[in-house]
Amino acid sequence: MPGDEEYDAKECFEKGKAYRKGDGVEQSDKEVFKWFKLAADLEDTNAQFILGRMYEDGRDVEQSYAEAVKWYRLATNWGDVRAQYYLGKMYEDGRGVKQSNIEATMWFKLAADQGCVDAQYRLGKMYEDGRGVEQSDAKAVKWFKLAADRGCVDAQYRLGMMYYFGRGVNRSDKEAIKWFKLAADQGCVDAQYDLGGMYEDGRGVEQSYEEAIKWYRLAADQGNANAQYDLGGMYEDGRGVEQSDAKAVKWFKLAADQGNVTAQLCLSFMYYEGRGVEQSDAKAVKWFKLAADQGCVNTQYIPGEMYEDGRGVEQSKKEAFKWIKLVANKGIANAQYDLGGMYEDGRGVEQSYEEAIKWYRLAADQGYKRAQYHLGWMYENGDGVEQSYEEASKWFRMVADQGDSDAQYRLGKMCEDGRGVEQSYEEAIKWYRLAADRGNHDAQYRLGEMYEDGRGVEQSYEEAIKWYRLVAGYGDVNTSCFFSDPYKDSELSDEEAVKRYGFEAWNKLAYLKSLGSMYEDDTDIDQSDE
């Protein structure tokens, strides 16, 4: 007891307050602690609670969670609701005591029953998560509602989420909007972001990009990465704002710097395409790799392509192989196909037909057409595998059944020649016609020959001329994939193919004319080109 004077608990508490505020005395942290401690020792509940807070936060005294727990517990002996709540938090977090959700829930319940708003919210969270109590959405909603009605912003947001997902209540977008709005108006960043999403999609409210922008911006200005990303997307698309790639980049960058993987991916494409920023392969690679390092499978594939081509990075087939294999191992079909190509050609890895076939098959088994077609090509030509027309026809048929004109042509040729399938001009005609109708000039040329010779069809110079014309230049030659395998580098350029096969078709037309067949009235043929 200071000096020879005696003080009661209330006087000691008031002196502590005076020294804290500097009210009539010089402010002194040392004196603050001394007088609150005296009051607490005299069983002043307020002083015990404040002493607990001082020890918890390390204010005016060396921080000690154990001492904080001690003083909170003493205050709870007198039913202090604040101490009950804070003691519950210490148990929840395991600070100064052994972590115990059961103990935390007990203290939150005692405080909540006395009307402590924060305790009501925390108790709702315990029921929502099933920590220390049996999980119950209905009870969570009960406690959230009690706290929300008294203005607890966190409870308002959680109650909105319960209505949004229909947990413990009937699902209602309108109720979700109501509670999100209350929380958002109090500055709750998560509520602002979710409210933006509701306005963007028109859920529970009339759809409005302008309102979505308003709420996204409020959340973004508080540093919410998801809101920053979505705001960037709105500027990129010009939804609710004037389209601006530059502003899209600004918001993508803010979100990307916080590790938002989708924003990193978008930012990489902006640099890759030079939209809103100066084009930079190097910066595109940087952001692609950051997204890839977070497990974004789609992005992991892109650095592989850039390393292979030497765009933005020093060309390295080995690095390209590393990135593409990373994606292929996750079951992505196009990466498995490309990995097969790297093994087949020995790009960035030791050449291995066995490994190539393995990866082509993995992609093909997922229905990837390019891999299926390429396997057919390899088996037809004995390229890296034992030649097998049966296997070739199997893979070509898979792709042909999906409407691919090149596979339809290859299958038609195998039917015509009787390789891997029973020889049948009729089947050959069927597949040639399907391919020809899709603009495949290879098939159109073969159809011309079949009609000219009367194989699989009734002989008809008129039909032969029709198909030869398409190849010779009467059809849409320039926009076709002309006599080329789109899944394998062609030995002929499109221009060379047009010249080569176009001339062959013209020769056929000239030959038919020399026979005097079908040409008496055919004035469409330019004589000079014969």
Image (cartoon, rainbow, N blue to C red):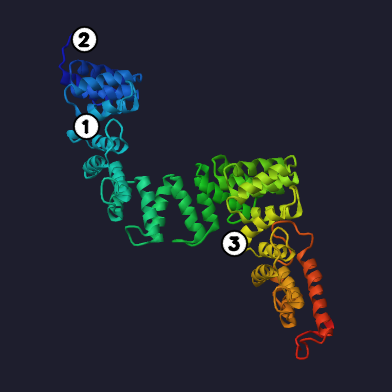
Question: Label 2 vs label 3: CA separation?
Answer: 98 Å
Q: Is residue 6 above or below residue 190?
A: above
Residue, x 19% and y 26% (percent of image)?
80
Q: Is residue 315 visible?
A: no
Q: In the rendering, at what x and y percent does residue 28 appear?
A: 30, 21
Question: Mark 3 — residue?
Answer: 402
Question: Label 1 vs label 2: CA separation?
Answer: 44 Å
Residue, x 79% and y 59% (percent of image)?
491
Question: Mark 1 — residue?
Answer: 109
Q: Nearer the viewer, mark 2 or mark 3?
A: 3
Crowd band around label 3 with a 10 angstrom C-alpha radius: few (<14), some (14–19), many (20+): few
Residue, x 74% and y 66% (percent of image)?
483
Question: Mark 2 — residue?
Answer: 3
Crowd band around label 2 with a 10 angstrom C-alpha radius: few (<14), some (14–19), many (20+): few
Amino acid marked by disc 2? Gly
Q: Is residue 269 above or below residue 155?
A: below
Q: Quadrant of the C terminus?
A: bottom right
Question: Label 1 vs label 3: CA separation?
Answer: 64 Å
Q: Nearer the viewer, mark 1 or mark 3?
A: 3
Q: Contact, CB < 8 Å: mark 1 with mark 2? A: no
Query: Looking at the image, is mark 2 or mark 3 earlier in the sequence?
Result: 2
Question: In what element is the residue under mark 1?
Answer: helix
Query: Looking at the image, is mark 1 or mark 2 earlier in the sequence?
Result: 2
Question: In what element is the residue under mark 3?
Answer: loop
